[in-house]
Image (spheres, rainbow, N blue to C red):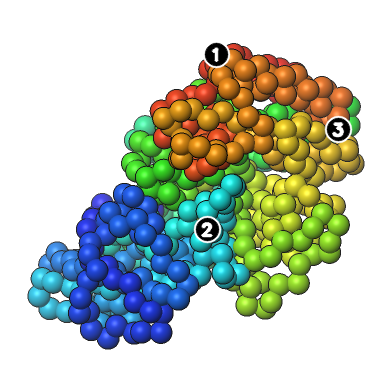
Amino acid sequence: MVRDRWLNLNGLWEYTVRPRQVELEKWARADGQILVPFSITSALSGVMSQVDERNRLWYRRSFSIPDDWRNGRVLLHFGAVDWEASVRVNGELACLHRGGYTPFSCDISPYLVDGNSQELVVSVWDPTDSGYQPRGKQVRNPRGIWYTPTTGIWQTVWIEPVPKTYIRSIRLTPDLAQDSLFLEVVSTPEGQSTTVQARVKIEGEVVVETTGSIGDRIQLLIPDPNLWSPSSPFLYDLEVSLLGNGETIDTVESYFGMREIGVEKDTEGIPRLFLNGEPIFQYGLLDQGFWPDGIYTAPTDEALRYDIEVTKKLGFNMIRKHVKIEPGRWYYWADRLGVMVWQDMPSGDEYIGRNDPDLQRSAQSAHQFESELKEIIDALYNHPSIVMWVPFNEGWGQFDTGRIAQWIKNYDPSRLVNPASGWVDREVGDIHDVHSYPGPDAPPIGPFRAGVLGEFGGLGLPVKGHTWQSEDNWGYRSFESVSELTDAYLQLLEKLKLLIERQGLAAAVYTQTTDVEVEVNGMMTYDREIIKMDESRIKEANQFLYSVAGSR
């Protein structure tokens, strides 16, 4: 959804914290300045303090609209705001959004005033772990495997001009059986008489061009498609335009990958994971997506890319993005660099035990979960790197498991559904997932679902000078040197090989990419300065797993 013109609103904003029930009709006094897009809890924000559920965080800044933007509409975009955001432009309510992980937009055209200066005020309320909303590992009292919360704006804020009739969204679905990409376009306002023109390009050259109508499922035939995979992450460029009365009304640029993920039986009748019709053992890292200086927000785009590059360099082909959603740029790099992604839904509400029935969530809690789940799938749908949705983790907030799994599969049949990673299996979905620390272990071979090890390992090594705190750091098991840690990891992989060969294990996820706060189970230190194992030995052992599994 790239257009030519846009304006970034990141930077220093005024902020103030007031009791939740106090409504600031007029902006009076600021507590100081905050650097957007970093959460108020982070060092990079310049504030580094928590805002609890009794208070509300207010932001304010002014901005200008170029004169040539006033002929159409002006959209205000937020990458993510945790959790409830109320947006006012020049004193008027432009939009209200609940959900800490998904992008949202406001058409602010009706609220713009004459002159150069426009006022933007955002108020945020975030109950963190005192509420039922999806929140992941955020808690008000960080400890062990629970981390510093994020409150407020934590992704980029920006504005862009669009025509009065514009492309609101595109949905891209590859279909290898038909050598096709299916394109669905939504425009605003709806019901306008416009034509969609789509052009597929390779290195700037148009290779496919077709037209269709808004609301149709437009088929683009891709001759002899180049397939996307971790070993060859080929991406096509895509240009989508709205045409009316012989003229181009609006144009966006995008990209897509041609790939297909599924569960099929191997030659011995064991269900395995297949990518593009070929068996592939998926081996990845549990990736929490936390940063010592930015908490939920990486300090730079290069930092986002670096974590994925190291994952690939160490011989992994997959990442399980754990109970967190990243900015779109993270998935862009996953697409470009070639890594498969298991995408968790951020967890929330209460737990169930291993032998308990599904949670009975309140109507409010269930509605919020399902609303945010749909927004997340919509926001990330076009990324070829994402091959699996994981709605529940270790019984946390797990409710109506069969219904939720089936809804996801119906809404996005192009991907696998892993309904419950660890603990509470309900014999539904595409995957049977177990956790074992340090492990490894495997679920019993079933007739239809692939068996995976959703978490294992967690081997710890605190590196002096590179820890969140000087003492009392935590790991499932702790070691004292790089060689000890590496040897222990390789011993786990020897056991993993047997599970692949003898118990049909189709995938595994090692905990974890980096240390996170007091948890020192990472392949890297929390500051990303040190890789804590012998890189060459790790890469060689990881890659050997693929040959054991007979996959590419």
Say which residue label 3 marks: 270
Q: Residues within 10 Å of mark 1 (few under 14, many from 20)?
A: few
Q: Position of residue 460 (x, y in %)?
A: 60, 31
Horizontal arrangement in the rendering, residue 214 relative to residue 390 (left or right): left
Mark nearest the camera among 1 and 3 is 1
From this view, report whether residue 412 is shown above or below residue 292: below
From this view, report whether residue 237 is shown above or below residue 135: above
Disc with the residue nearer the chain's start (3 vs 2): 2
- Residue at horizontal 69 percent and vertical 76 percent from the top: 362
Query: As shown in the figure, which amino acid type bears the numbered disc 3?
Result: Ile
Query: As shown in the figure, which amino acid type bears the numbered disc 2?
Result: Asn
Q: Position of residue 471 (x, y in %)?
A: 50, 37
Horizontal arrangement in the rendering, residue 57 relative to residue 453 (left or right): left
Q: Residue furthest left?
A: 115
Q: Circle 1 sits in a helix, a strand or a loop, which is it?
A: helix
Q: Circle 2 sits in a helix, a strand or a loop, which is it?
A: loop
Horizontal arrangement in the rendering, residue 224 relative to residue 123 (left or right): right
Q: Which mark is residue 536?
A: 1
